[in-house]
Structure formats: structure tokens, C-alpha cells
Amino acid sequence: MKTLLPLFFILILTLSYGQKKEVKKATKLFESGDVQAAIAMLESNAALFDAADSKVLNQKTFLEGRIAQANKDFDLAYEIYMAFQTAGGVDAGFDTQLQTLSSDIVNSAIEDNAEKRYPEAARKLYLAYQIDKEANIDYLYYAASSAVNGSYYEGALVYYNELKEIRYEGITTQYFAKLVETGEEVELSQSEYDLYKKTKEYTDFREETTASKFPEIVKNIALIYSELGDNEKAMTAVKEARAENPKDLNLILTEANLYIQLEENDRFEALMKEAIEQDPNNATLYFNLGVVNAQKGMTEEAKNYYHKTIELDPNYESGYLNLVSLILEGESAIVAEMNSLGNSRADNARYDTLKADRENLYRECVPILVKLVELNKNQEAVKTLMNIYGTLGDNEGFMKMKALVE
């Protein structure tokens, strides 16, 4: 026994030395750029590491994390690093390695977004956020945005709800100054802003704080619930948001859109009018009121809203088209009555009256359609105007529109 005990310790030391040696060899191979050889080294010595102590195992684990990161298996890399940390592993480069992992993940997500692989980008950005939830909080917001862009609504809902829970604002300060030479205002980084203040090349320095993103987050939660068909949760979300920001135009419009989906036109109309109080020169709001009133059969009110639409925005094509369509709705009743008449003197007189009424409808449409054709030769407007000119016997107008069609 006196000779066996020292030999036993020698065997342990030899085994331990061999384990450390193999880890060092694999690390050197990895750092030289031969990732596959490093993997092969670890795999071929798997049995040797089965009996390794915690220190050697942690070194091996950390290297495996670096290998997974190099192979862009970011989820696995993060999982391994967390296991390393939980096991009490210590490495001088651990914090730097996590920062590098975060950068690698974000750069990969940027590539995914550029290639429109939005769900993949969203998941990666969320992973980057998990690495450091305080420093990388903005990545959670970008993850939600990428998820929405890719119609990955379930993921987006998770991200937005997390943003809501922590009341993410995303407020930043922007820095601006004017070039003395050109007078052009440019946006600067904070360091440039501080530096250029000491020069004479820039003037009119100013700072601007961006708006809070919180209302947008709650609005998007409501919209996503609505997209997923859960209007009850959508309405709850938007009402919560409006309780905090009752005058927020986007939230008013979000609630209004929900009422449209619920076919509650009266509530929609009330909210549209509330929105107009906030933004009285918004042509789209008047257009929406025109649509709702038209659906309710309130033709004159709808016409007035459509006229207001194109008055505020002369380029609003749908305003012109909906107005003409609304006017021409009166034609069907006129034609039906004309077709029901007989050949008596009274019927013929009535027919002439109805014919004049029909032509007056057409004449009411002409200046509206002419304006739209002047804007961009809208083909629907051109064809409608050509038919109207043909019915009214305006050959010159008919030929002009026919030429545009051809």
C-alpha cells in the first residue's frame, strides 16, 4: 500500500494534466482559425473529459460556447455560456465574449432584415436583448418591429407585452446644427455635436427629444390582437392606452378601426369626429367619415365629407372616385323607373324628366372626373368620363378620353 498511494496520485495528476493539455490544444486550434480541428479534438477526447474536474470541464464548456458562436449557432452559444456561468466558470474574457456574441447576433439580424427574413431577425434580436436586458433593451423593441414586418404576430405580441410591462419609452435625444457654408441643417452624433460647438463651421445648434414609443407599443398590441381575431383583448388594450393618452390621435384611430371591424359604425363615426378635433386638416379622416355615412345611406353628408377630402388634399384619388360612385348610385333608381314606364303621354313626359335627371347626375360627375384625369390620367376615371361623354353626346370629350384609353 505504501507504493500504491503515490502511484495513485501520479495517475490522477497525469490524467488531469492530459485533460488540460487537450483543452489547451483544442483552444489553440480554434484560435488559429481551425474550428473543425478543435471540434474533432474535443470529440476524440470525450472519454478523457468524463473524469475531468470542474475547472477543466468549465474550460472545455467555454471553448464549446466559442465554437458554437463561430458557427453562428447563437442560441446554443448563449445556452453554453449560461451553463458555464451557472457552473461557476471563470474566464477573464467571459464578459467580452458575451458582448461579442451580442454584436454577432445583431449583425446577423441586420442581414436577415435586409433579406426580409423578419421572423429570424426578430428571434435573434430578442436573444441579444436577453444577453443584457438593461444595455440591450432597444433590441426588444426592434425584435417586435421585425416580427410585425414578417407577420410573426405571436412573437410580436410576446415582445410588445414585455415592452409594455417595463413601460419602455425609447426616448432619445437628437442633435442638429446648420452648416455655415450652405445653411443646411444636419443631424449629428452627440460626440460630433460637442466637438463642432468648438468650431466655426456650424451654427444654430439645437437638441430635440423624440416622442415616447409607449403609445405606439400599446397601439400595436391592440392591432395584433385584432389581427389575430381577438377583438375583446384588442379593445381592452386600446382602452388602457387611451386612459393614459386620451388625446393621442393614433390611439383614437386604433379604437375607431376596431369599431369598424365590430361593425359599430356609430362609435366609429364619433371617434372620427373626435380625431378631426385633434387633426382638422387630415383628409383621410374626412374620407373615412364619407365612407361610413355612405354605408348608412346618408348620401348628402357623405358627399360633403368627400368634397372636404379633396379640398384638403387635391391628390386624394379615392376621394374623387368615391364621390363619383356615390353620385352615380342615384342612377339605378332613375333607370329602373324609366324602364317601368309605358307609352302614355304622361309616361313620356315623366320619361323625359327622368332622362334629364340622369343627365344631370352625369354632368355633376364631369368636373370631378376631369380634375382626377388631370392629376394622373387615372384609367378608371378616364373610362367613366368617356362613357359619360358618350351618353351626353359630347363627341369631342368622348374622342379625347378614347385617345387616353388607347
Image (cartoon, grey):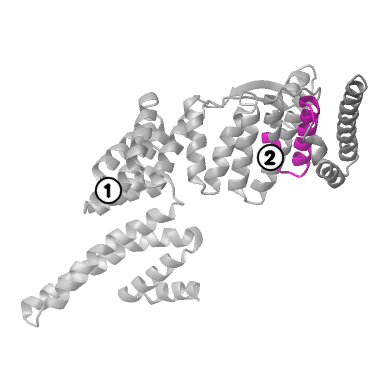
> Which residue type does callout 2 highlight?
Leu
Task: Identify the image quadrant of residue 187.
Answer: top right
Q: Residue at x 27, y 48 (%)?
A: 263
Residue 76: numbered disc: 2
Q: Position of residue 211 (x, y in %)?
A: 53, 27
CA separation, marks 2 and 1?
48 Å
> Which residue type does callout 1 highlight?
Glu
Q: Residue at x 46, y 73 (%)?
A: 400
Mark 2 element type = helix
Whether residue 369 is visible: yes
Q: Which residue is mark 1?
A: 263
Segment colored magenta: 52-79
Residue found farthest to the bottom: 343
Q: Main secondary structure of the magenta part?
A: helix
Front-most of residues 9 and 103 = 9
If you read the primary sequence from the N terminus, does the residue marked by circle 2 or circle 1 appear first? Answer: 2
- Residue 117, placed above or below residue 378: above
**Pointer 2 and pointer 1: residues touching (CB < 8 Å)?**
no
Front-most of residues 15 and 72 = 15
Whether residue 282 is visible: no
Instruction: Tell whether 2 sits left or right of 390.
Output: right
Q: Residue at x 30, y 43 (%)?
A: 259
- Residue 340, placed above or below residue 213: below
Instruction: Tell whether 230 sits left or right of 77.
Output: left
Q: In the rendered image, which quarter contains the N terminus? A: top right
Sort mark 2 into few (<14), some (14-19) or many (20+) by Cα contacts within 10 Å: some
